[in-house]
Amino acid sequence: MFEQAVSETTNNLSIGLGHDADLADTVRALIVSQPRLTNVEFKRWFGLVGTRDYPDAVAFGYVQLVSAANLQAFIKRALADPVDTRFRSRLRSVIPGGKRPEYCLGRLGVWDLPVSLPPVLDLCDTPEGPIMQSARNSGRTLAGNVAETGQQLVDQFLLLVPGHSRQPVLRGSLGTDTLLLLYGPVYRNGPTVPPTEAARHAALIGWTVSVFDATQLVRTALADQNDLQLQLAHVNPGSKPLVVVRLGNSDPGSPLRTTVMLQGGWRVRLASTAQLGGMSPLRQAAGILGGGLAVSLLVFLLVFALIRSRKRAIELVDQATKDLRHLALHDPLTGLPNRTLIFDRTEVMLARARRQEISAAALFVDLDNFKEVNDTLGHDVGDELLRAAGARLQSTIRESDTLGRLGGDEFVVLVESEQPGSRPKMVAERILEAFREPFLLETQAGRPIRITASVGIATGDRTTPQELLRDADVALYQAKALGKRRYEIFRPEMRRSVTDAVELKAELLAAVDANQFFLVYQPIVDLETFEVTGVEALLRWRHPVRGVVMPVDFLPTLEESGMIVEVGRFVLQEACAQLARWRDRDITLLMSVNVSARQLDSDQLVDVVQEALAVCRLPSSSLVLEVTESAVMLDLVEATKRLRALRSLGLRIAIDDFGTGYSSLAYVQQLPVDILKIDRTFVSRIGLSEHASTLVRSVVDLGLALGLSVIAEGIETHLQLDELRAVRAGAGQGYLFSRPIEVSAFDDLVHVDDVTRRLFLAAMRGAAVPPNGPTPAEAAVLGAE
């Protein structure tokens, strides 16, 4: 029975440790795939995934390897997005002090401990430093001592936080018999560990720091084995075993003891605590003598029991092995093959294709705008959508094809065919067609969710599986860049566009730090009086080599990377500051500022707006925030709440690019908006398409009926102006009046007197003379011109 108990317990423990290792692997993949991940996003993800599926997970963090050259930029970003708000603005110098080539600094964290992880603590200069460096070089996950590291945090940092003093809050309450601390290396290219120590050293970008409740883990493994004592230890290379937890009290004289080594450097020692009972030696002897009468029967039963026990143990080992293998090779969310198994099957497919001279192809499938589903509807809905998407993808392929999930919303399909090129296209077309139907999810109570997919295809032989999948990923990137909801086949020249995209992200990050962004302003003109009544602040990038870069070339990357939140804050603050400067010179205008979907989804937006208005001492009625239809319709309910909160401040809300998004005119009356802006694509077709003219008239009539102002964008011709005036559009902007201009040129425009301004914007540009004819003074100016 002891052997059976040992087998069951060690199997349970292996599964539990493997389960926790899966969480660490998932976190590492999340960090690599989303390098701009914020603490808010990380905590939200962990709250939905970690605490639900991993009850023994106490804390999780990410320690980033930071070079000396990037130290100040890292600290600036970390303090703006802290793991713990107590450290937001108080600690700005690395501790321990001193200049070093590299630092190990906490970037992300979810902690349920008495002490947090300050962003300026160089963990490489703590007792855990050698363990972290060993993990870096070996590629293995290694154990650390929670009590020592945690107490050092207390000793060095809590004195810097008001209300705290130096005290041993960890020693005695959090020891190695309570918590399990693990450091896992994170490499630049994801879960694949580089083959050599030099390559691992060069590829490392940081470490995951995971803390698990080892007592709960061991109790779960022991189940109802009350007569066992268990000691769990982790063996780091070149170090003594670190005992993590002990449970149970064993008899030192008991012969029933064993030690088992588990995968990952774990050592388990088990001993039986079973006793013979409280009988006297005489009674024990009598019992043994009486039992001799049934020796033959007992021998038979013992042999039979041992056979059954051994068979059961073997069955448990086999089942546990199968379970562990399945967990190691399959995605826990969808049940599909994971990255490890996909790489293995890709290698097998390439080898078979060479032998049998058939075509091999990999299809990268990515759900378009999936992050917006997660951000607006929550990760539970996102997980359900991923499961449904996996099932739908499975229905589009043959049994001989392979479907797997790499992580996030990325799937891979492996296809073999005797006809090069044709079958992968057919599969891609079926995938696109499958996503035309909406998803009906249980968590949404029948409310349909529409989401499309993009596909990248790579075919032909490659040296390694990584090369084939990389090229499919490059083709996917091209499909995304060309508008999504399509497939693209890899061509070698595509690699350049991906390289450009990576370089663009790096340049944009540098542009934020170097203050290379600036604003231009386009006048908004009253179409009845031809007076400038407002301006729209528009973003530009003054690139040190390329000169002024237009938003169409960098805004999508800002939005995708999340940098748009920080840049959007700058736009709002700078626009308000400029408006304040104009108001100081008695120039009264409305300032319109664009708000992106990411900003609208942020809980900080209302605070950012209030702060900008307060710092510049502006009345809220002087500010207009412009949001697009598509941003609002991502989650109509939440967007409406946030727009109401903004409007309650006293500012105005405009729906930008109206007519191009997902909404219908019926939604407008539900939204807390003041202004409709007709998109330039409809204005540009006035006179060319009766449909465009009808739509423009409908939008204007709708706005007037709802008491909203209407602004037409992109006015470039006199015909467009006359048509818009005829349908009573209130205001407009476009090249007919003025291009977006810098502050100095705008000052020249708004400083002229009323008469000259009207003529500058009307008569001098060839537009219709205002009704009732010119005044005598205006006629004199016209005559002089």
Image (cartoon, rainbow, N blue to C red):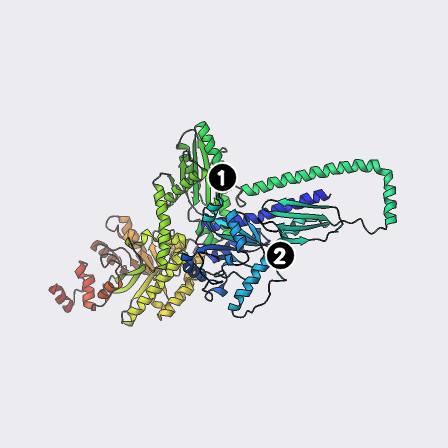
Residue 778 in percent (x, y) is at 15, 67
The mark found on residue 734 in the picture is none
Looking at the picture, how far across and down is residue 418, in whole percent?
43, 28
Q: Is residue 450 left or right of residue 225?
A: left
Residue under circle 2? 176
Mark 2 is on which residue type? Thr
Q: Amino acid at mark 1?
A: Ile
**Residue at (57%, 41%) from the top-left corner?**
326
Q: Secondary structure at mark 1?
A: helix
- Marks 2 and 1, the one that precedes in the sequence: 2
Q: CA distance from mark 2 to mark 1?
A: 38 Å
Residue 9 image offset from top left, x and y in percent: 67, 46
Binning the other alpha carbons within 10 Å of mark 2 as few (below 14), some (14 to 19) or many (20 upward) gives many
- Residue 370 screen position, x and y as percent: 44, 49
Q: Closer to the camera, 697 or 156?
A: 156
Quarter of the image with the N terminus is top right
Reply above or below: 598 against 582: above
In this view, the residue in front, 216 or 456, is: 216
Where does the C terminus fall, quadrant-wise?
A: bottom left
In the picture of the structure, the residue carrying the numbered disc 1 is 342
Looking at the image, is mark 2 or mark 1 nearer the viewer?
2
